[in-house]
Image (cartoon, rainbow, N blue to C red):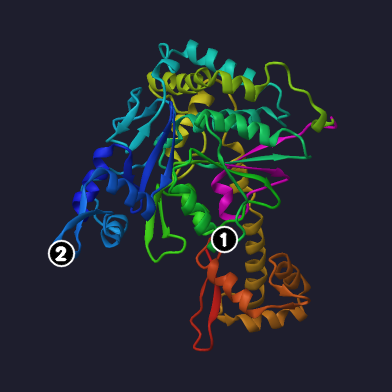
Amino acid sequence: MAVGSERLLADEGSYFHTGGPIVRIKRDGERASVELVNDHTLTAVLADRAYWERKGRGNDWTRCDPPPHVVRAVRLGQDRPHLLNLSGLAHQPFYGADGSLVTTPGYDEGTGLYATFNRADFTLKDPTREEAIYALDYLKWLLREFFFVSEKDMAAALSAILTAAVRPTLDQAPAFNISATQSGSGKSHLAKLIVLVATPDEAFNTTYPEKDEEAKKVLLAMLLQKPSAIVFDDMQGSWKPLGPLNRALTSATTTERILGSSQTATARTNTLILGTGNGTEPEGDMRRRVVSIYLDPKGKKAALHRYSKDEPVSHARKNRGSVVVAALTIIEAFRAAGQPFAEVPPIGTFEEWSAKCRHPLIWLGEPDPAESLIEQVRQDPDGDLLEELLDIWSDLFGTRSVTVRKVIEKTAERPDLLDVLADLNLLDGRTVNPGRFGWYLKKNRGRRVGCFRIEPGESLERRSWRVIIN
């Protein structure tokens, strides 16, 4: 009965699975959203689509709702022989599995995307360099009132717009950090503009998670609903390198346990991720996963800034088709020109993103939009501190195997060692925490910094470590 019930759902055309859970697409004109299906909804739909009976008193058959065990079997089933997989929503033309631009709304089997848009709103002209330059000028006009620190910050914002236009078909893409020097600088306004290129609807706005467990719950719950964009608005701290968020930015899918259930689910990560805040910076491994856009009014009272009559967000909302077409024209023109890649440092994991959202802008004469990401990787304070620690360590012990406790004992005679351990946040008050120090070494085992790396020692004593000099 479960298989037959699933077939009934599939025939509806609006029910899909997303790596486990069943979802349905809710339509409102040309707009659509995705919601998880619960037992109550399944019961109502199956009761409406089929005639269910049970034997009552006197062996008489009477109509009833589908049995709860059938409903649960449908919802929790591991095999989905009839329901199609939904990888996401596309609110504009998108790139199909063969690399060509798909301009037809509806479900696309090659990508698993469900497209919901009026194709008449997205008419592309011949993708020539001249048309691409015109499209670029239009997008730069749209950004004219934001307080970018430099041209490379505007280039990063342009790249965010291109990313928003094609994010559903990119397996991986960096997040974008919109950071300003003061409140009211237009961070959230810029985020709204970028989000409008991804979807005519609102983004999922949420608080940046503090710990891994929180990140698992929040991200999976949101990604299963296939949002076009997630915005960590008004961040109060930096982009912490949380495992679930790291995976969401560099993997095509993420698998986590569903909140309140023992069941796991696999969700696609093809969602635009933005964050806004004052002085926000990516930390640790997030440095190679986040492109930063810096805004600075430079003494002006930003909160009192009055946008022109044709202000960016209102214009984009009224002319969304034109904005998306401009972004796609730039990408298509670059492809038509044979993809003349620039001589810039490659960014591992984000090759496809670079081909569509980075190199086309450089081809048109813009600064490298990924320059902030590259600089963040080069200027790695965590790596610098580790290198400083291992330099002092090798001066004290050479390449001998020593325990954490012996290293800590040396802080009495080497204040520079105590200083670097303090900078690494390994102290409790004025003393080094051995457990935290050991965890830090384990986390960084094998990592190369300068000519050093830390590896497990060969001592027969308690857990020991040694510095390897390359």
- Is 292 in the magenta? yes
User: Which dot marks residue 451?
Assistant: 1
Q: Which residue is mark 2?
A: 58
Which residue is more in the foreground, 199 or 63? 63
Which quadrant holds residue 370? Answer: top right
Q: What residue occupies the far left of the structure in this picture?
A: 59
432 displayed left or right of 249: right
Which residue is more in the foreground, 153 or 220? 220
Q: Secondary structure at mark 1?
A: loop
Q: Position of residue 399 (x, y in %)?
A: 56, 75
Task: Tell which circle, 2 or 1, labels the residue nearer the N-terminal end.
Answer: 2
Hey, what amino acid is under mark 1? Answer: Cys
Which residue is more in the foreground, 70 or 287? 70
Q: What residue occupies the far bottom of the structure in this picture?
A: 461
* Residue 146 makes an appearance in the image: yes
Which residue is more in the foreground, 68 or 441? 68
| Mark 2 Cα-neighbour bin, 10 Å: few <14, some 14–19, many ≥20 | few
Q: Position of residue 329 (x, y in %)?
A: 46, 19
256 displayed left or right of 234: left
> What's drawn in magenta, residue-wise?
274-300
**What is the C-alpha distance between the residues marked 2 and 1?**
86 Å
Q: Residue at x 53, y 26 (%)?
A: 362
- Is 48 in the magenta? no
Q: Is residue 344 above or below residue 79?
A: above
